[in-house]
Image (cartoon, rainbow, N blue to C red):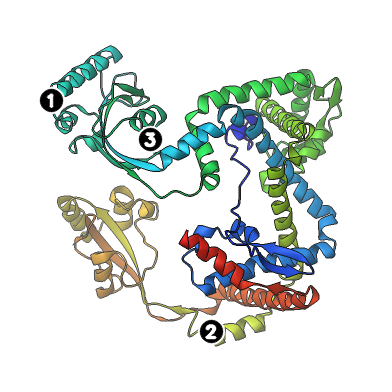
Amino acid sequence: MMKRLSVLTILMGALVLTHCSKSSPRGDNVIATMDGAEVTVEDLFSRYPQERLAQAADDEIKNAVDDVVRRALFVKDAIAMGYKDSVGTKAQIQSVEDQRLFQYVYEKDILDSVINEAQLREMYDKARYEIHARHILVQHRDVPRAEASRSKEEALALCAHILQQLKEGAAFEALANQYTEDPSGKNSGGDLGWFGWGKMVGPFQETAFKLSVGEVSDVVETQFGYHIIKVEGRRETDVKPFEEEKDRLKRLAARDKAKVLQQLAQEFIFNIKANKNFQIINKNVDALYGVINASKYKVGPIDYVLKNVNFAAPLFTLDGETYGSQWIIDEVNKLDVNAKPTVNNINDFKTLLENMVVHALIIDYGYEKGYHKDAAFSKAITDVQNNIIYNNYVRDQVNANLNPSEKELLEYYENHKNTDYMQKEMVRVREVLVKDQTKADSLYKIIRDGADLGLMARRHTERKYAKERGGELAPFPPGRYGEMGRRAFEMSAGELSEPIKTNTGYSIIKVLEKIEAGHQDYERVKNRVKNDINQEMRKKRTDERFNMLTEKYDLQINYDAAYDAYRDGNNN
């Protein structure tokens, strides 16, 4: 199977890249300095948004400040040590920048051509309100999964009949109960409750949000059928500032305009291939796949296959120049090892080749247009770069050589077994759960008379996750599974219960094992012990390095600036 999405699919799934951070509402915008470099409130808010900690205690804000400052301090030391210029770090940064630029091209050349600032502000204004509405849904046979057999014309005629009754004074709720084909509204007068912008499909919400309270719409068509809508109420809601909501609103708008965006994306891909005169050399690709099929290297990532078959003929052309297997190998080597594609047939290979070439062409196009120099893009890439540098630094300077000996593991276990590695009293059962009491009684008699409970569970139990295990449940402590669990702890190992009434039906259980409370066996928790030691060691090393760098870079932290910044957000 080809493990690579089409370029069109990736383009259409691209998320909005840019994010805007809020500036501090106070003049004191610096929370830390280190050798003259500043960590600002904006840096803090980008990792811990203002609204997230507006109600937080000082200790929680202090922890957030310490985290952001520590990251900045480690990055500063990493750059001084040459991490930014290392071959590995440069390759990681370039890979992420290319992928982000690919997405940014979609935003700039496709998304922004359809969705503009004025539209987003209009959506934002609508998002400031919720409406309470009812509707009557009339379906027809052309609606997917509809049970109605009427034609569209007959559905429209029924809608006209309903509207006429409303004009004559009939109650909307009564007509909804009588006519609506929305199951959730059949006995509630078509009530949809309160909802905000973006919760309903495009044509429905466009109409509903334009109605006044008490007003009834004309017929509205969606993919679900025909709707008649009545607005019962309207109220304001708390919303974040426009700049913070902008990305979410853009995603909602993109969903509503998916067909238009897909068409533009297809045209964009067609044009970018045509401008570079991209052509697959089919006879050579066919010959390559013949060589692959005749070789022993049919299975595996495509770069592994191509390296071993060593096919020299060109596979495609761009602007008259030819490219072959090595180009594909080089491109695949940029991917994470788990993301490397595999192919099973020649059509998959040709699709993969086209996707890879178009992907590379779009990235080149972004650089040619200078999109990588845009302020928003540059800021996002700087954040990515710092994150990569930080992670590599921590990997080498904090997490390296964490390998406690067997003696250390045993000693840690002995010192903590009474607090961290205690086993609660547990019970392990096999169960058949059915909804009907008559069926439960019948199954109980069959099992009591010798039928295999596990086989009965595979055939009849309603607890789906245990079906393949013959009804066996993982060991559980007191308090689980309600009445069934309570009864299980009263029973002895090997005992079979009569049907037990539960909230979901009737359980028949057999106790497989009673597990006494006590220390968990060392071998069973050995990996947990190792993780716990390593976690303590990482914290110790992190604190030691932070304290050392505090002196080295003359770190000064202004916690009051952070407290004030978050408190101002709360007051506002």
In the rendering, which numbered label is found on residue 416?
A: 2
Whether residue 4 sits left or right of residue 58 in the image: it is right
Q: Secondary structure at mark 3?
A: loop
Position of 156 relative to 188 (above/below): above
> Given the image, on which type of amino acid does mark 3 rest?
Met
For marks 1 and 3, give the CA distance: 28 Å
**Location of residue 136 with respect to 151 vertically, above or below:** below
Image depth: mark 1 or mark 3 in front: 1
* Picture layout, residue 525 above or below residue 474: below
For label 3, the residue is 200
Q: Nearer the viewer, residue 398 or 208?
A: 208
Given contact means CB atoms under 8 Å apart, are the residues at marks 3 and 2 in contact?
no
Q: Residue furthest top?
A: 153
Real-space Cα separation, disc 2 to disc 1, in angstroms? 75 Å
Q: Nearer the viewer, residue 48 or 315?
A: 48
Residue 169: assigned label:
1
Residue found at x 67% / y 27%: 351
Q: Position of residue 412 (x, y in %)?
A: 59, 83
Judged left or right of residue 100, residue 472 is left
Circle 1 packing at 10 Å, graded few (<14), some (14-19), many (20+), is: few
User: Is residue 75 in view?
Assistant: yes
The type of residue carrying mark 2 is: His
* Front position among marks 2 and 1: 1
Quadrant in the picture for the N terminus: top right
Q: Secondary structure at mark 2?
A: helix
Which corner quadrant of the image does residue 447 belong to? bottom left
